[in-house]
Every structure is written in structure tokens, then in C-alpha cells.
Image (cartoon, rainbow, N blue to C red):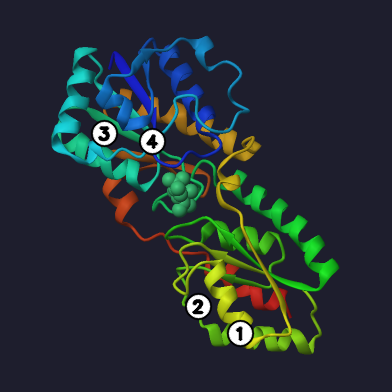
């Protein structure tokens, strides 16, 4: 392995820069030439590839976003796009590729690494934490803290006005972010796609809330919940509980930005170094995962297709915590 390239793709996540930094520095440490690809697979197809030196990654560990920029590439889903991408790598004699991203990124990486003789290794980077084979993805911890800080702010005004707030949290298909931040923020209810949302239960909760009596409350809704987003659920609740003063806040992309937490920086740094090591050990088509604090290699196939279970224990204590 003489030449490696690195890219970030899909939704950005805080800590991606720390991972890029680690990949660059670990490569140079091993005397491997390292190249940065701009705008994910889009830049790979366009040949937007530049050699990197150590100082290119100075002063970025604390920054959110990604210095390599990111994109969701439609062209990479086509055979012609991938062939062009492969030719660009071959032209520069690059034989290893490190991709930092989530589900979509690894789906593309798996096809690319099977179609062409290029070794691809993945680093999990998504605030959704929805990849199988790893307890944590880069950006998840920072996003939790961002959501918790938003919940704290909203609780102040909810309490002041005796209001019921529905807060929508990101997570197209997964409720990891909603569950953990909901527990940390003291939410009264958490609605996630992994669990059936029975509006009757929600009604029951609200009725009980009245009896307690509770004058304000926070209900966290993962954007992928089966009953709909926060606006839709709030609308249904409004018609049945006219005496509740209901408000909705959709946190949106605020959750994707910001200074990465120390946890994300450390995870990203470790994974970056391990991704380079994996390539020098001739690994391919795998993601670097972390399970109970230990690093492990997980096939792209498993990382994408495996159904990561939600933490049932955490989910089940919610009713106790709100007793
Ligand atoms: O995959 C990360 C994520 O933030 C999801 O939680 C969300 O559904 C999606 O990306 C939003 O994507 P975009 O920024 O392209 O609108």
C-alpha cells in the first residue's frame, strides 16, 4: 500500500474532521502518500483529488463539518460514474480508499470495492448511529449533547407557559438519537420508529399527566416515526386535548453542526488510525466498528443490512423515570 485516498460522504457529522486528521497523520507516519477527495463520491468522479500534507489537517480537530466537504452522489449509483471514479484513482496509482460516512456511503463503497480492484475501508460517521456492528458512530455523541441543550432551553419556556412541546429530532429510520437525548433531557415520552407508536398510549400518558398534575411536558419524536413527524402527531393530539397548549419545534440541521465532543474526537482519532492499519493489513470491504470499547472489523454488508437493536433497557425505564 503506497497511496491512500480519503473522502467524506453523505450527511456530515461532528468529528469527521478529527477522523480525516487521523487518517492523514497515520498514513504519513507509515510513509504512505495520502490524498484528499473533495465532495465525496462526486469529487471522486470529477477527479477533484489533492495530495495532503500534515499541516493540511492542523487546527481542524475542534471543527464541525468536514474540510473535504460532502455530498450525496446520484452519479456514483451508476456504473459509468463508478468506472470514472476508478479510472481517476488508477491514474494517480491510488490503491486504497477510506470512506467516512453512513449507510448510503457504505452501500456505494461495497459495490465499488466489489466491482474494481480497489481496497475500501469505512469509518462510521453519522449522527444517526444506525450502523450495525458498532456501538458508536462519529457525531452521535455531539448530536446528543446538542439536542439535550435544546431540550433544556425549551423546557424553560414550556414550564413558564404550561405548554406541551413536541420536539422533532433527526433520524430518518432510527431512533437512537431521540432515545438517548430524550432520556438525558428528561422527556416525558419518546416516539421512535423501532417501537410501535400507539397514539392511545400517548393519550393515556397525557390523561395521567393531567391527573398528576403536569402542566408542561416534552415529547421527543424521531423524524422517522411511523405516526409521522412532530407536526403531524401534535395535530392529532391537539384535536383530542384542546386544553393543552401545544407547540412544535423541529431541531433540524442544528443537530449536525457544532464543535465535536471529546468523545467523538477520541473515537474518530482511533478509528482513523485503525482504518489506515486495516488497509496496510490488506483488509477490504470492511468498516471499523467499536463494540464494548474494543475495535472490530465489520463487513460492509453486515454494517448496512444488520438491524442494530435499540437499547430496550433504556427505552423501558422511561415510564419509571416519569412515574
Ligand atoms: O443521515 C443523517 C441525517 O442527518 C438524517 O438524520 C436525516 O434524515 C438526513 O441526514 C437529512 O439529510 P439532508 O441533510 O441531506 O437533508
When asked about the image quadrant of residue 208, the answer is: bottom right
Which mark, by number, is residue 284?
3
Q: Are marks 2 and 4 in contact (CB under 8 Å)?
A: no
SS category of the residue bearing label 4 = loop
Question: What is the crowding at mark 2: few (fewer than 14 residues within 10 Å), some, or many (at least 20)?
Answer: some
- Distance between the Cα atoms at labels 1 and 2? 18 Å
Question: What is the crowding at mark 4: few (fewer than 14 residues within 10 Å), some, or many (at least 20)?
Answer: some
Which mark, by number, is residue 110?
none
Residue 91 at x, y = what percent? 19, 13
Mark toward the start of the polypeptide (1 vs 2): 2
- Distance between the Cα atoms at labels 2 and 3? 40 Å
Q: Is residue 9 left or right of residue 179?
A: left
The mark closer to the camera, 4 or 3, is 4
Residue 188 at x, y = what percent? 69, 73
Question: What is the crowding at mark 1: few (fewer than 14 residues within 10 Å), some, or many (at least 20)?
Answer: few
Mark toward the start of the polypeptide (4 vs 3): 4
Residue closest to the far right:
160
Front in this rendered view, residue 244 or 14: 244
Q: Are marks 1 and 4 in contact (CB under 8 Å)?
A: no
Question: What is the crowding at mark 3: few (fewer than 14 residues within 10 Å), some, or many (at least 20)?
Answer: many
Q: Height in image: 189 above or below 53? A: below
Q: Are marks 2 and 3 in contact (CB under 8 Å)?
A: no
The answer, for residue 291, to whether it is visible in the render is no
Please give the residue where the numbered disc 2 appears in the rendered image. Answer: 197
Front in this rendered view, residue 121 or 254: 254
Please give the residue where the numbered disc 4 appears in the rendered image. Answer: 71
SS category of the residue bearing label 3 = loop
Residue 54 at x, y = what percent? 50, 11
Mark toward the start of the polypeptide (1 vs 4): 4
Amino acid at each position: 500500500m503506497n497511496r491512500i485516498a480519503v473522502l467524506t460522504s453523505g450527511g456530515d457529522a461532528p468529528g469527521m474532521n478529527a477522523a480525516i486528521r487521523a487518517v492523514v497523520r497515520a498514513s504519513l507516519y507509515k510513509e504512505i502518500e495520502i490524498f484528499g477527495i473533495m465532495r465525496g463520491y462526486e469529487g471522486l468522479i470529477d477527479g477533484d483529488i489533492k495530495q495532503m500534507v500534515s499541516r493540511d489537517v492542523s487546527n481542524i480537530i475542534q471543527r464541525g463539518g468536514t474540510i473535504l466537504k460532502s455530498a450525496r452522489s446520484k452519479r456514483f449509483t451508476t456504473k459509468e460514474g463508478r468506472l470514472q471514479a476508478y479510472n481517476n484513482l488508477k491514474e494517480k496509482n491510488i490503491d486504497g480508499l477510506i470512506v467516512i460516512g453512513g449507510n448510503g456511503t457504505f452501500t456505494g463503497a461495497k459495490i465499488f470495492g466489489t466491482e474494481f480492484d480497489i481496497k475500501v475501508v469505512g469509518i462510521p460517521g453519522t449522527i444517526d448511529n444506525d450502523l450495525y456492528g458498532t456501538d458508536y458512530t462519529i457525531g452521535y455523541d455531539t448530536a446528543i449533547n446538542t439536542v439535550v441543550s435544546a431540550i433544556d432551553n425549551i423546557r424553560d419556556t414550556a414550564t413558564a407557559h404550561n405548554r406541551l412541546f413536541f420536539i422533532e429530532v433527526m433520524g430518518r429510520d432510527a431512533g437512537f438519537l431521540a432515545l438517548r437525548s430524550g432520556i438525558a433531557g428528561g422527556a416525558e415520552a419518546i416516539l421512535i420508529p423501532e417501537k410501535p407508536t400507539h397514539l392511545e398510549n400517548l393519550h393515556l400518558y397525557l390523561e395521567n399527566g393531567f391527573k398528576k398534575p403536569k402542566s408542561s411536558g416534552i415529547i421527543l419524536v424521531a423524524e422517522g416515526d411511523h405516526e409521522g413527524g412532530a407536526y403531524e402527531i401534535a395535530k392529532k393530539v391537539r384535536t383530542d386535548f384542546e386544553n393543552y397548549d401545544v407547540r412544535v419545534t423541529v431541531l433540524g440541521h442544528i443537530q449536525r453542526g457544532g464543535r465535536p465532543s471529546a468523545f467523538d474526537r477520541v473515537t474518530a482519532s482511533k478509528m482513523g488510525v485503525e482504518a489506515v492499519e486495516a488497509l496496510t493489513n490488506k483488509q477490504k470491504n470492511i468498516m471499523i466498528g467499536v463494540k464494548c470499547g474494543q475495535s472490530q472489523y465489520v463487513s460492509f454488508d453486515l454494517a448496512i443490512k444488520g438491524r442494530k437493536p435499540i437499547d430496550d433497557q433504556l427505552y423501558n425505564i422511561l415510564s419509571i423515570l416519569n412515574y
